[in-house]
Image (tube, rainbow, N blue to C red):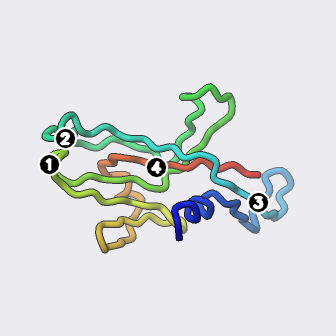
Amino acid sequence: MSFTDALSFHTSVEEISDVSCSGCGSKVTIRKKVLLFLIVHLKRFLSPEDKIKGHVDFPLSLNVAPYSSSTEDMDYDLYRFIVHAGEFASLGHYYTFIFGSSLWYRLNNEEINLVVKQEVLKQEAYICSSKGMLST
């Protein structure tokens, strides 16, 4: 698989069956497509020796409309974030948390572990990636 193959797959239209229509109540199939990605870098390093430590609350879902010129909601869902473990910016280890199939996983080298949402929310996130979805 190439980078462009992965990008095409990730941005393809997703069909979801048996969704209750909010207007009529009947079961329908909706189509969703990833529109935009939001990557937030929480600057946790002042210099190679200086790391900013401590928890920063981060939402699993965020409406970015208040931070843009849009008058409509712009909802983004967190699907991945990176954590830096170590005392200094120049030393340490990176690992990631990723959301897939309605579950959170921690990926650390060759290890993949299922984690609960409460553990996810306690992490000292470094870089957060979210995606915006729109029904078509």
Question: Residue 54: x and y, percent?
Answer: 24, 42
**Which residue shows up at 46% across the image and 44% down it?**
39
Whole-number angstrom distance, CA of label 3 to CA of label 1: 47 Å
User: Which residue is under mark 3?
Assistant: 30
User: Which residue is under mark 2?
Assistant: 51
Circle 2 SS class: strand
Marks 3, 1: nearer the viewer: 1
* Count of numbered circles in the view: 4
Whole-number angstrom distance, CA of label 3 to CA of label 4: 24 Å
Whole-number angstrom distance, CA of label 1 to CA of label 2: 7 Å
Circle 1 SS class: loop
Q: Are marks 1 and 4 in contact (CB under 8 Å)?
A: no
- Amino acid beneath label 3: Ile
User: Which residue is under mark 4?
Assistant: 129
| Camera-nearest residue between 84 and 25 | 84
Whole-number angstrom distance, CA of label 4 to CA of label 2: 21 Å
Circle 4 SS class: strand
Residue 87, disc: 1
Question: Residue 16: x and y, percent?
Answer: 71, 65
User: How many neighbours does mark 3 have within 10 angstroms: few (below 14), some (14-19), or many (20 or more)?
Assistant: some
